[in-house]
Image (cartoon, helix red, strand yellow):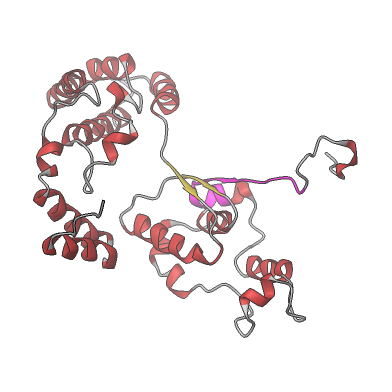
Amino acid sequence: MALSPLKPHTRTLHRRLDEAASYTEWLNAALESDQRLRLDEWRERDRSSLYGSVELRTRYDLLRDLLDAGRTQDLLYALNEGIHGNMCGMGKAVLYNRALSGTKVLIDAYVNVVVESLKFIASASDSEIPRAEKVDFFRRASHCYGRSALMLSGGAGLIYFHHGVVQTLVDNDMLPHVLSGASAGSWLCAQIGTLTDAEMKAGYFDRFRYDLPTHLNPFRVLAGMEPEATPLSVKERAIDSFCSDMTFQEAYEHTGRYINISIAPAERHPDRPDSGWHS
């Protein structure tokens, strides 16, 4: 069965999304698309079988009332009673795949009120909340609520798309502190793990270029047909162009980011005696 053609305005919106040069442009097009498809109404409507909307609304109203009243101890008790990233099932992927501009407005509001509550507790005086109690609360909250992480995949030459995503996150002050990367993603992970937001906002990605033998045919290099270079030598040359002598500890002290690099063994069966693998 042939698919029906997109309506002209829908095609225009899709083109705007594809050609957006910034997150702001993309978001404006996404908001307009959701409005035309009436998905903005879905976002604004609390009720849904996809998550516990009634309970989440109750939790939101409670935190909001305690915050507005400045009731520090009661707010701390309410947060201790229940704080985690999947409250009432709000972490389900299906809730984030329907509307382009975001999930339910109630979920956004709840996350924001939790952030506001945590900042309020952090700023409370020692007479209101003893320091030891405050530290203990935030340690437990960190485990229960969790942290956002940026996981960068491989992609060889597509690494420059990673550059654009990271730059957009940095420009909007949304880059997570926990980073993980594999293959080409590990290259970028190593870079942003050693750079502060200010350093990246100053135009790091605009200026940086990998040191590559651009005069050679990349396909011939990968096929081992270039006498001047091998795939391994090209990779080592590119890695040397961005790696420094900064240790993981020094990188953390400089940026506050946690770097996780995925490493796979060279052999498929490292536990076999004849695999050449040594621990």
Q: Is residue 109 visible?
A: yes
Q: Is residue 195 magenta?
A: no
In the image, 14 versus 125, the foreground residue is 14
Residue 274 occupies quadrant: top right
Instruction: Answer above or below: position of 33 versus 243.
Output: above
The magenta-colored residue range is: 251-266
In the image, residue 269 above or below residue 247: above
Residue displayed at 14% across by 26% down:
47
Q: Nearer the viewer, residue 4 or 57?
A: 4
Could you tell me residue 66's position as x and y percent?
Answer: 17, 21
Relative image position of residue 168 (x, y in whole percent): 35, 59
State the residue in front, 259 or 32. Answer: 32
Q: Position of residue 204 (x, y in %)?
A: 45, 68
- Tell me if 9 is positioned left or right of 89 in this view: left
Q: Work out whether residue 199 can be spotted.
A: no
**Residue pictured at 47% horizontal, 66% vertical:** 160
* Outermost residue to the right: 274
Judged from this view, the residue extending furthest toward the front is 1
Quarter of the image holding residue 197?
A: bottom left
Q: Is residue 221 above or below residue 88?
A: below
Please give the name of the residue rendered at 85% of the width and 41% of the height, measured from the top-left corner.
Answer: 278
Could you tell me residue 203's position as x and y percent?
A: 41, 70
Residue at 52% in and 52% down:
153
- Is residue 253 one of those drawn in magenta? yes
Which of the two residues, 276 or 25, is positioned nearer the viewer here? 276
Query: Which quadrant holds residue 41?
Result: top left
